[in-house]
Image (spheres, rainbow, N blue to C red):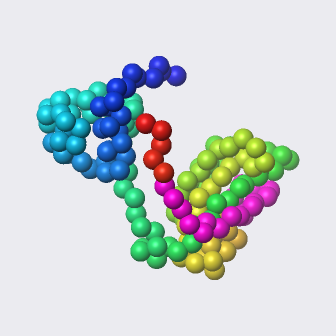
């Protein structure tokens, strides 16, 4: 593990603006934090080189694309003939409706975020794809009602 990079108030302001809109230009960032375009660009480059910024993300409106249901699944793998975690992760990652795969500690081995067009579509994905994965012993589902995204600590 690498040591955390020292961040000042300007670095934190840059990160806050980029977390809201990763597509901001160095010129726009500079104007928002009181830096020239080259100075803002150098700071962003430094943050990328240090691994603080590791990419940009596009947030899609799933409902506008016809995916109206999001379900969080807790998946417990069986202990008899224990399947390798890598085999499970490889198989579950191949399912397009599975948006995230998180290996967790606790009651379940994995937490999945699954999107579907509706409950019937989710049931199809659950029965035909997820329940047939290698090693799946138990699944617990929580349907998402709403979501608030809060900025992380910067």
Residue at 31 percent across and 51 percent down: it is: 21
Query: Across the whole image, how many numbered discs are drawn on residues?
Result: 0
Using residue 60 as the reference point, say whether residue 104 is left or right of it.
Answer: right
Residue at 62 percent across and 73 percent down: it is: 122
Using residue 102 as the reference point, say whether residue 50 is left or right of it.
Answer: left
- Residue 12, image x, y percentages: 36, 34
Q: Is residue 58 above or below residue 18?
A: below
Is residue 129 visible in the rendered structure shown here?
no
- Residue 151, image x, y percentages: 45, 47
- Residue 69, image x, y percentages: 57, 72
Magenta region includes residue 138:
yes
Q: Quadrant of residue 128?
A: bottom right
Q: Is residue 33 above or below residue 132?
A: above
Magenta region includes residue 87:
no
Residue projecting furthest to the top: 3
Is residue 113 visible in the rendered structure shown here?
yes
Residue at 33 percent across and 30 percent down: it is: 9
Residue at 64 percent across and 60 percent down: it is: 72
**Which region shows up in magenta?**
131-149
Using residue 81 as the reference point, say whether residue 115 is left or right of it.
Answer: left
Q: Quadrant of residue 86?
A: top right
The quarter in which the C terminus is drawn is top left
Q: Is residue 103 above or below residue 128?
A: above
- Residue 119, image x, y percentages: 63, 77
Using residue 4 as the reference point, say whether residue 122 is left or right of it.
Answer: right
Q: Nearer the viewer, residue 24 or 97?
A: 24
């Amino acid at each position: 593990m690498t040591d955390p990079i020292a961040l000042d108030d300007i670095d934190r302001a840059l990160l806050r603006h980029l977390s809201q809109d990763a597509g901001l230009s160095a010129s726009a960032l500079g104007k928002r934090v009181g830096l020239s375009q080259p100075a803002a660009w150098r700071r962003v480059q430094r943050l990328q080189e240090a691994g603080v910024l590791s990419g940009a993300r596009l947030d899609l409106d799933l409902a506008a694309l016809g995916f109206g249901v999001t379900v969080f699944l807790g998946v417990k793998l069986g202990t008899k003939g224990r399947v390798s975690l890598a085999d499970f992760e490889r198989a579950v990652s191949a399912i397009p409706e599975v948006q995230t795969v998180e290996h967790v500690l606790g009651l379940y081995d994995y937490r999945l975020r699954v999107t579907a067009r509706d409950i019937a579509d989710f049931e199809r994905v659950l029965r035909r794809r997820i329940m047939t994965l290698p090693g799946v012993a138990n699944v617990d589902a929580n349907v998402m009602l709403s979501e608030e995204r809060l900025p992380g600590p910067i």
